[in-house]
Image (cartoon, rainbow, N blue to C red):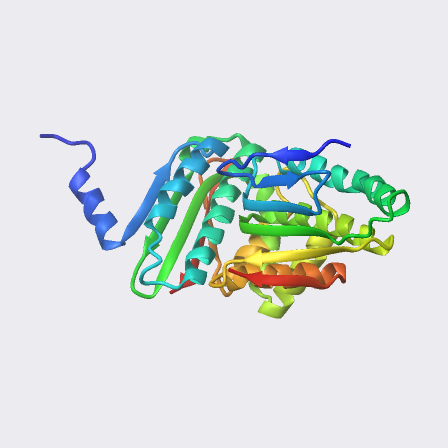
């Protein structure tokens, strides 16, 4: 399975999903012109990553923790819908019994970003680790 | 000099109203990016809190993207659209205006009136319901107005002014306390 690496632009975040890694990062600003076009491959990648986790766990006995790191400065309301979809996809991995967690990084002055993470966590019913910077 | 428009009058108006940015024209994605970059540099984090800076930026993006959305739906004289940001000692005011087809007014008005009558808790519930409903289109998830209402303590004001038999000018204004 190929890694998914997307460079940041002024309106879209950086995506660093390296297949061999245990930490997958989405960071930056998100208000892409076409949110569906931007986020669909990201969500598809996470769904397919389950096969890699299956192989790691059952063929290699590797149960290392996988972390999805959200480190967003800003996201618009259209992106919010897709971020929720990503979090739901991660929740599915947790439900399959894989050792996966979400880290929600935020600027410590940005109460709204903390609130947004709390809302997502409650909607999906998945505890996040909140990390202020 | 017989100026058609008195530039001094305009600059005085800008100063009186503390206009940080005003733009009229077509609001495509590229223009929106340029405007946001410009205004980002003018949001001064030294005298307002970091959260307020983020909040103002958030409301700016949603408001300006709303103009873009209406323009995509309507195609009517997009060049008449306007976006303006003012600041005084107590607040930022964000104003957008754009032509809209009269046929689109009832649905928009219904949504605005509904949002304006909700408490913060009710707005948050509406946001949760909307984001989970799956009704997403490229014209937005329908979350923008709810989001603006939450971030501005529900300070939305709006008006429609008739332009032609088919179109009106839609003005939308919010305030963010400093």
Residue B125 x, y percent position in the rendering: 67, 64
Residue B90 x, y percent position in the rendering: 33, 66
Q: Is residue A113 left or right of residue B91?
A: right
Q: Is residue A32 above or below residue B59?
A: above
Residue extending furthest toward the front: A60
Q: Is residue B66 above or below residue A6?
A: below
Residue extending furthest toward the left: B1
Which residue does the image show at 56% across and 53% down from the upper left? B145
Q: Is residue B147 visible?
A: yes
Q: Is residue B43 left or right of residue A132?
A: left
Residue extending furthest toward the right: A58
* Residue nearest the viewer, comparing A40 with B80: A40
Residue B126 x, y percent position in the rendering: 67, 60
* Residue nearest the viewer, comparing A93 with A41: A93
Q: Quadrant of residue B150?
A: bottom right
Which residue does the image show at 40% across and 41% down from the upper left? B37
Q: Is residue A5 above or below residue B156?
A: above
Residue B130 x, y percent position in the rendering: 69, 54
Which residue does the image show at 36% across and 50% down from the upper left? B85
Which residue does the image show at 32% across and 57% down from the upper left? B87
* Residue nearest the viewer, comparing A9 with B173: A9
Q: Is residue B119 visible?
A: no
């Amino acid at each position: 399975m190929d890694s998914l690496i997307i460079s940041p632009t002024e309106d879209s975040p950086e995506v660093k999903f390296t297949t061999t890694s245990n930490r997958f990062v989405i960071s930056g600003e998100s208000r892409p012109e076409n949110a569906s076009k931007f986020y669909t491959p990201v969500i598809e990648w996470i769904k397919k990553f389950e096969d890699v986790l299956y192989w790691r766990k059952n063929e290699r006995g590797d149960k290392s923790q996988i972390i999805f790191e959200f480190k967003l400065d800003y996201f618009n309301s259209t992106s919010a819908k897709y971020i929720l979809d990503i979090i739901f996809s991660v929740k599915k991995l947790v439900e399959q019994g894989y050792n996966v967690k979400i880290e929600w990084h935020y600027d410590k002055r940005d109460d709204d970003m903390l609130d947004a993470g709390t809302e997502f966590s409650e909607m999906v019913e998945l505890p996040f680790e909140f990390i202020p910077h | 000099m017989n100026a058609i428009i008195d530039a001094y009058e305009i600059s005085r108006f800008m100063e009186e109203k503390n206009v940080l940015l005003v733009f009229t024209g077509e609001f495509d994605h590229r223009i929106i990016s340029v405007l946001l970059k410009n205004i980002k540099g003018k949001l001064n984090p030294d005298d307002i809190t970091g959260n307020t800076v983020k909040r103002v930026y958030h409301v700016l993006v949603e408001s300006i993207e709303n103009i873009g959305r209406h323009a995509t739906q309507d195609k009517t004289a997009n060049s008449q659209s306007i976006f303006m940001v003012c600041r005084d000692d107590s607040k930022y005011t964000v104003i957008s205006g754009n032509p809209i087809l009269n046929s689109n007014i009832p649905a928009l008005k219904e949504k605005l009136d509904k949002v304006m009558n909700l408490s913060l808790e009710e707005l948050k519930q509406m946001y949760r319901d909307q984001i989970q409903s799956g009704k997403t289109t490229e014209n937005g998830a329908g979350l923008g107005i709810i989001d603006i209402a939450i971030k501005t303590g529900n300070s939305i004001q709006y008006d429609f002014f008739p332009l032609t038999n088919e179109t009106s000018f839609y003005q939308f204004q919010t305030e963010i306390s400093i």
